[in-house]
Image (cartoon, rainbow, N blue to C red):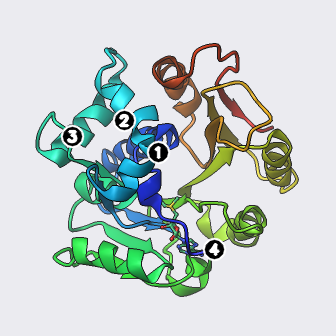
Amino acid sequence: MLNYKHAYHAGNHADVLKHVCLIYFIKSIKYSYNSILYIDTHAGSGYYDLNNEHIQKNKEHQTGIEKMLSFTTNDPYLRFYLKTINNINKSNKLKFYPGSPKIIQHLTDKIDELYFYELHTNEFRLLKNKFLKNSNIKIINDDGFRFPSKIKIKKQKKGIILIDPSYEEKDDHEKVINLITKNYEQLENKIIIIWYPMINRNDTNNFIDGFKKTGIQNILRIEMPIQNDNEEINMTGSGLLVFNAHNKTKQSLRGTIIELQKCLQLKGNKKKVIVNYLR
Ligand SMILES: C[S@@+](CC[C@H](N)C(=O)[O-])C[C@H]1O[C@@H](n2cnc3c(N)ncnc32)[C@H](O)[C@@H]1O
């Protein structure tokens, strides 16, 4: 693969869903814990200039952040997401769309321990250059699936692990399931967030079934379709599997995801959001 560039997709509906939830979880643990651990297994290049040629080519941000900017909502989590994006831009006028690394850096402190993995050398260089001054951030040009054997993870430390491959590699689904199956015990105290695209209904169902078979309890599935299933090869929505979320999450986030879908769905969509435990 390594042809994938997140800049083509930055700020689209799937990024918005992922980042709304990521911000929700970061905020929930930053309140209660002094120093947290964060690992981004697939970081991308950090943040994206909206005038960049890649973004302008597909204009995918028009399916996500652009719609959000003109959406009026009282939902506290969506409002906080928008405030975070504006604060990062230092303005209400959007110049940059922040990727997960920039969002996390913005919402954490020097006492937090952050690791960003990026395998693609060009993306890695862009990412590294953006965070040179942050001594608490380690930026690693390696395969993010290998983090459990590379990072010493303290069991008692609270943290978040974001697993966000592009799934352009055929075996990415399998790698994600294996990563969790083999290392879950070591990661039991961490909130693990796995992002997945909804392109083909069977692929999505097989992926979800793979996790059901692990026997791990309390896996929260958050899914936001923006259009009905169809025969074309396009992303009709996206989802997240979240491990070790606090027990109020389902109740707190359900209304937020329904509200987000109202803003981002295409005309005629009949598919409903899912915010439920797998078993
Ligand atoms: C979907 S993008 C990440 C987006 C980012 N997490 C965000 O939310 O802004 C996936 C990134 O993973 C990188 N990548 C692909 N395979 C990888 C691997 N095995 N380990 C680490 N990075 C990888 C790609 O180059 C790409 O930049």
Q: Disc 3 and disc 1: Cα gap in Å?
A: 15 Å
Asked if 119 appears above or below 172 in the picture, the reply is below
Q: Residues within 10 Å of mark 1 (few under 14, many from 20)?
A: many
Q: Is residue 131 visible?
A: no
Nearer to us in this view, 275 or 270: 270
Specify whether tag 1 is near ligand 1 (CB below 8 Å). yes
Cβ–Cβ under 8 Å for marks 1 and 2: yes
4 or 1: mark nearer the eye: 4
Q: Which percent across, then down, holds residue 64?
A: 43, 34
User: What is the distance, in whole Å, between disc 4 and disc 1 at their CAs?
Assistant: 20 Å
Look at label 3 and name its amino acid.
Answer: Leu
* Of callouts 3 and 2, the N-terminal one: 2
Q: Residues within 10 Å of mark 2 (few under 14, many from 20)?
A: many
Identify the secondary structure beneath mark 4.
Answer: loop
Q: In the image, what residue type sits under mark 2? A: Ile
- To which residue does mark 2 refer? 65
The circle on residue 1 is 4
Q: Is residue 267 above or below residue 21?
A: above
Residue position marked by numbered label 1 in the rendering: 15
Say what secondary structure mark 2 lies in: helix
| Image quadrant where one finds the C terminus | top right
Question: Which quadrant holds the N terminus?
Answer: bottom right
Q: In this figure, which residue is indicated by the disc labeled 3?
A: 94
